[in-house]
C-alpha cells in the first residue's frame, strides 16, 4: 500500500533504507522522547527496519522531491492502548532537520483517512510521554482528545520510568474534523445536517437504536460534503439496512433545537425526512426486531406500533403526533425540545 499527499509519499520500509534511517534515528533528540534509544549503526537500523518497521500499516515518510525517507509513521494493532479489533494506535517519528514544517500532521491526516476509510476502524489512539511537547502539539493539532494520564510507568528500552498520556480519536470525530460530514462543533454546541427515512408497514414504523443511545430514532445519518439529500438517504439506508429503497417524497425540513441525552451537546440540526418505500426489498421479512453490524457497531431495528409511539423513548418527538397526518407537500417546521 502506498499513500500520497501533496508533499509526501507514505510507502513500506525497505532494508535498503537503512542508511537514511540511521541518519535521523541516531540523533538523541528523536528516539528517546518516544521511548526508544538512538540507533548506533547502519546495521542496527537495517535490523530494526527488518524486524520492527517493515510491518503492515507502517510507512516510511518519503519526500516527493527527493524520494528518500525522513521519518516513520504507522498504525499498531493490539497495543497497550488499542486493545480491540476495531482500534489501532498511531505512532510516528521524524528527522530533526524536518521538524516544524507540518510534515507529521500532513502524513498523519492521510493515514487517519486510510484508517477510518479503507480499514473501517472505529477508534485510533495516540500517546506520548511526559515532556514530549512536540508530539503533544501534533496530537492536539490533529484533534485527538485526552483520555487519561498514567502514574510513572516503565520505559523498558530506556531503563527508566515516565508518566504517559493517552489520547483518542473516534471515527465520528474524524468525519467532523475532515469535513466528511456537514457538521461542526462550536464549544458545547453542535450543528448537523441530516437525513432520516420514514419506513411504514401496516401501522408500524421502523425505528433503531445502538449501544450508545438509550432511545429509539429513525434510520438515516449525516449528509456528506457535496452530497444531495436524496443521495445521502439512499446511501445511509443501504449502509444500515443493506437495501435500496424508493423515495416516495420528502416530508419535512425540520429545524431542531435540543440537548442530546448522551453527549449533552446543544444541537442546532437541519434534518430532511423522507417517506421511503421498501416493498420488494425483503426488509419486512426480517421479523419484528433484528440486529445488523455496521462498522463494528451493533444496530438494533424494531417495528414499533405507531399508536404506541407516544409512550416510547423516541426521537424526534414531533413525529409521535405528526405520524398520523403526513404532509402531501414538502413542509418547513421548527421544533424546540
Image (tube, rainbow, N blue to C red):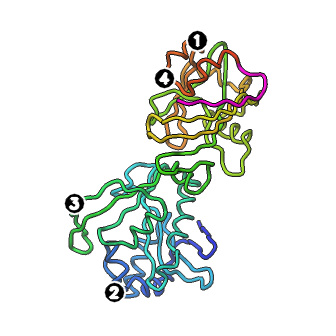
Nearer to me, 80 or 50: 80
The mark nearer the N terminus, 2 or 4, is 2
Q: Is 336 inside the magenta-drawn segment?
A: yes
Task: Give the Cα separation between the discs numbered 4 and 3.
Answer: 42 Å
On the picture, is 306 further left or further right than 140?
A: right
Q: Identify the mark at residue 313; answer none if there is no mark.
A: 4
- Residue designated by label 2: 40
Asked whether the beta carbons under mark 1 and mark 2 sit within 8 Å of each other, the answer is no
The mark nearer the N terminus, 3 or 1, is 3
User: What is the magenta range?
Assistant: 326-337
- Residue designated by label 3: 151
Label 2 residue SS? loop
The mark nearer the N terminus, 4 or 3, is 3
Task: Give the Cα separation between the discs numbered 4 and 1.
Answer: 14 Å
Front of the two marks 3 and 1: 1
Q: Residue 110's quadrant in the figure? A: bottom right
Q: Residue at x 60, y 85 (%)?
A: 66
Amino acid at each position: 500500500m502506498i499513500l500520497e499527499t501533496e508533499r509526501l509519499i507514505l510507502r513500506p520500509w525497505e532494508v535498503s533504507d537503512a542508511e537514511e534511517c540511521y541518519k535521523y534515528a541516531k540523533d538523541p533528540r528523536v528516539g528517546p522522547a518516544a521511548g526508544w534509544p538512538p540507533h548506533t549503526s547502519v546495521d542496527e537500523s537495517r535490523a530494526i527496519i527488518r524486524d520492527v518497521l517493515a510491518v503492515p500499516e507502517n510507512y516510511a515518510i518519503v519526500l516527493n522531491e527527493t524520494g528518500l525517507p525522513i521519518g516513520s509513521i504507522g498504525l499498531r494493532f493490539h497495543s497497550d492502548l488499542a486493545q480491540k479489533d476495531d482500534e489501532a494506535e498511531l505512532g510516528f517519528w521524524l528527522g530533526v532537520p524536518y521538524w516544524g514544517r507540518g510534515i507529521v500532521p500532513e502524513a498523519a491526516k492521510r493515514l487517519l483517512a486510510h484508517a477510518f476509510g479503507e480499514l473501517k476502524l472505529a477508534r485510533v489512539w495516540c500517546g506520548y510521554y511526559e515532556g514530549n511537547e512536540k508530539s503533544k502539539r501534533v496530537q492536539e493539532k490533529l484533534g485527538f482528545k485526552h483520555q487519561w494520564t498514567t502514574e510513572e510507568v516503565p520505559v523498558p528500552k530506556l531503563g527508566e520510568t515516565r508518566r504517559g498520556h493517552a489520547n483518542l480519536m473516534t471515527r465520528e470525530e474524524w468525519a467532523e474534523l475532515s469535513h466528511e460530514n456537514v457538521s461542526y462543533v462550536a464549544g458545547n454546541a453542535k450543528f448537523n445536517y441530516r437525513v432520516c427515512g420514514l419506513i411504514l408497514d401496516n401501522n408500524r414504523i421502523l425505528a433503531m437504536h445502538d449501544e450508545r443511545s438509550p432511545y429509539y430514532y429513525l434510520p438515516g445519518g449525516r449528509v456528506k460534503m457535496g452530497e444531495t439529500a436524496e443521495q445521502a438517504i439512499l446511501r445511509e439506508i443501504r449502509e444500515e439496512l443493506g437495501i435500496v429503497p424508493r423515495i416516495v417524497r420528502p416530508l419535512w425540513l425540520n429545524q431542531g433545537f435540543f440537548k442530546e441525552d448522551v453527549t449533552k451537546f446543544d444541537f442546532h440540526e437541519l434534518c430532511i425526512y423522507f417517506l421511503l418505500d421498501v416493498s420488494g426489498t425483503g426488509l419486512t421479512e426480517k421479523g419484528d426486531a433484528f440486529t445488523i453490524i455496521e462498522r463494528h457497531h451493533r444496530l438494533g431495528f424494531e417495528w414499533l406500533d405507531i399508536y404506541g409511539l407516544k409512550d416510547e423513548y423516541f426521537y424526534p418527538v414531533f413525529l409521535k403526533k405528526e405520524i398520523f397526518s403526513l404532509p402531501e407537500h414538502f413542509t418547513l417546521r421548527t421544533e424546540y425540545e
